[in-house]
Image (cartoon, helix red, strand yellow):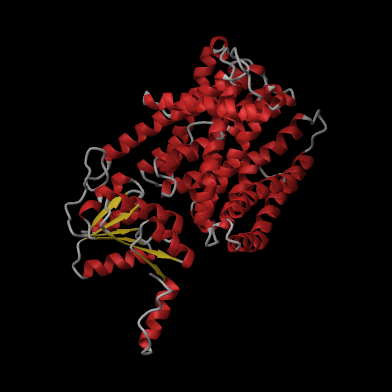
């Protein structure tokens, strides 16, 4: 009976095994990802017992990549993406070149041909979307400056892989007839396709997608709204791949960025979160199913060298590049740790190489085994980075063994030192009100401290950061973060730690007001409403509109 329903069976067995082994891994103080990977190995073709459908599992995991990148796009804007281009673009390109060179050298040392060795090196150079984003989200780093750079770096790698997936078959099928003109033509066509997709999303998508979702929300049907969110994320991803030959992940990311401009972005992110988590688990299960454990015995030195390049080589190159661009040591460590693994694009490359008969079989097995080992090691590397950065932080920064970094009481906490938060903090200091600022930008924090004021470096979503700012003893929290999704997470975390504190946040419309109040805000201010109320008050009218900000 089971063979008549391979899709249902693969999902059911994969999730049950992942749940059991993930729970076991958590109990013995390992990352649940280790359990998910072990579940895939258990139901894979290289171990006895039930064997899941590898092709189906791989396709299901691709849905997880799409939904995850769609969710990241909901937190990102074009402005934020452009803001990190100066480090993400050169950093990603140089890091990929260095990692490819290291992998090529290893392949040649193992006796493979040049084409096989280069493709092997290229597969080692690109990080996994799922692993990076899960690691950043678990540590509340996704919305920090380092997180933005890491995501921008990832997007550049995805674009490079889009080009690679076009160029590799052309090079492999050249047979002496390949000319520079033909290769240049293929590259130009790829760039034109990507540019056409971006232009379509910018000029058409940013008008159509938010408008469509708003009309669906007006129906009042929750299931239709959730279906609309999934249809947009998956539809744009598949459409981008079909029409423009852009990767699923890249298409979904741009769909999320476009939808972010809608007032419904926070609701879309919440509704898609359970599915994102479930399919992300299936991604790790699919990875485990692909690995042949026999490679450990056949090529032990090759496997160690592969893992060393992925974890050590890539992280070291990224660290040096970020430091060379004059970013802080802690930011360089976070970005290096984020990139110290490989995943979905690596699997696509080795599959392509196998289909074109240019990749050595051991190279494919080493990439897959290296991926699973790097995914296991990555949380340990992140834990080490957190310890190192905490030890070396300034006394007023967040330390693991110091729950408070401020001695202030009955003070105001200002989250975000941008235009709104900065103005609020300066007015409070001028009035002599004890004020502590939380910001994730090291330059801003250093500038505040140089002026003699208290500031905590970190993401205000984290409990330790809020405690370092003295949340329990604070009289009020002013959330100046402009993105309602991030602001809502901060409000929720602050309310949980201090049920009585007065929390004031900012929004952009009535939907933001409802969402932020639902998360625990005492009052939500909407800029246009506040300006209108002041104008009316100035003219001698009523002080405020009861249906405006609350």
Q: Quadrant of residue 515?
A: bottom left
Q: Nearer the viewer, residue 494 or 298?
A: 494
Q: Residue at x 69, y 53 (%)?
A: 197
State the quadrant of the C terminus.
Answer: bottom left
Q: How many marks?
A: 0
User: Where in the figure is residue 169, as x and y percent of width and height?
Assistant: 74, 33
Please indicate, yes or no, whether residue 469 appears anywhere in the rendered image. yes
Q: Nearer the viewer, residue 327 or 295?
A: 295
User: Where in the figure is residue 68, as x and y percent of width and height?
Assistant: 55, 43
> Is 255 placed above or below 378 here?
below
Please indicate, yes or no, whether residue 128 appears anywhere in the rendered image. no
Q: Residue at x 49, y 18 (%)?
A: 304
Q: Is residue 115 left or right of 429 when viewed as pictured?
A: right
Which residue extends farthest top?
297
User: Where in the figure is residue 194, as x and y percent of width and height?
Assistant: 68, 50
Q: Residue at x 46, y 27 (%)?
A: 22
User: Where in the figure is residue 214, as x and y percent of width and height?
Assistant: 59, 63
Q: Is residue 216 left or right of 370 when viewed as pictured?
A: right
Q: Residue at x 70, y 22 (%)?
A: 3
> Is 469 placed above or below 543 here?
above
């Amino acid at each position: 009976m089971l063979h008549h329903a391979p899709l249902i069976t693969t999902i059911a067995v994969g999730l049950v095994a992942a749940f059991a082994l993930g729970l076991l891994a958590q109990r013995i103080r390992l990352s649940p990802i280790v359990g998910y990977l072990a579940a895939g190995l258990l139901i894979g073709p290289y171990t006895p017992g039930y064997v899941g459908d590898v092709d189906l599992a791989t396709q299901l995991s691709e849905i997880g990549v799409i939904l995850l990148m769609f969710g990241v796009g909901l937190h990102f804007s074009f402005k934020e993406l452009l803001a990190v281009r100066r480090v993400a673009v050169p950093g990603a390109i140089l890091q990929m070149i260095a990692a490819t060179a290291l992998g090529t050298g290893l392949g040649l040392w193992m006796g493979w041909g040049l084409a096989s060795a280069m493709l092997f090196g290229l597969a080692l150079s690109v990080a996994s979307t799922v692993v990076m984003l899960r690691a950043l989200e678990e540590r509340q780093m996704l919305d920090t400056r380092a997180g933005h750079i890491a995501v921008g770096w990832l997007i550049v790698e995805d674009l490079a892989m889009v080009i690679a997936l076009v160029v590799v078959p052309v090079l492999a099928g050249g047979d002496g007839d390949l000319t520079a003109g033909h290769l240049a033509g293929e590259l130009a066509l790829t760039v034109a396709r990507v540019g056409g997709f971006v232009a379509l999303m910018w000029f058409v998508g940013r008008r159509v997608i938010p408008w469509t979702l708003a009309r669906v929300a007006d129906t009042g049907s929750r299931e239709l709204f959730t279906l609309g969110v999934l249809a947009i994320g998956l539809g744009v991803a598949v459409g981008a791949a079909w029409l423009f030959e852009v990767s699923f992940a890249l298409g979904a990311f741009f769909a999320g960025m476009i939808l972010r401009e809608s007032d419904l972005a926070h609701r879309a992110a919440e509704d898609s979160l359970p599915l994102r988590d479930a399919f992300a688990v299936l991604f790790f299960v699919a990875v485990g199913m692909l690995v042949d454990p026999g490679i450990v015995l056949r090529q032990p030195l090759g496997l160690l060298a592969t893992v060393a390049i992925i974890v050590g080589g890539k992280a070291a190159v990224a660290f040096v590049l970020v430091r060379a661009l004059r970013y802080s040591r802690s930011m360089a460590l976070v970005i290096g740790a984020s990139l110290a693994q490989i995943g979905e694009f690596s699997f696509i490359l080795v599959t392509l190489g196998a289909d074109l008969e240019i990749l050595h079989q051991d190279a494919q097995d080493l990439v897959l085994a290296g991926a699973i080992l790097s995914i296991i090691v990555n949380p340990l590397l992140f834990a080490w980075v957190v310890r190192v950065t905490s030890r070396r932080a300034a006394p007023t920064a967040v330390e693991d063994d110091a729950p408070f970094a401020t001695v202030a009481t009955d003070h105001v906490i200002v989250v975000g030192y941008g235009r709104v938060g900065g103005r609020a903090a300066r007015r409070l200091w001028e009035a002599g009100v004890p004020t502590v600022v939380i910001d994730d930008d090291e330059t801003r924090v250093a500038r505040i401290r140089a002026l003699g004021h208290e500031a905590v470096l970190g993401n205000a979503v984290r409990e330790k950061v809020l405690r370092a700012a003295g949340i329990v003893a604070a009289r009020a929290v002013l959330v100046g973060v402009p993105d309602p999704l991030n602001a809502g997470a901060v409000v929720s975390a602050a309310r949980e730690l201090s049920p009585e504190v007065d929390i004031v946040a900012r929004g952009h419309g009535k939907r933001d007001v409802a969402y932020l109040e639902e998360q625990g805000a005492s009052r939500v201010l909407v800029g246009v409403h506040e300006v209108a109320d002041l104008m009316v008050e100035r003219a001698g009218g009523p002080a405020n509109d009861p249906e405006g900000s609350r």
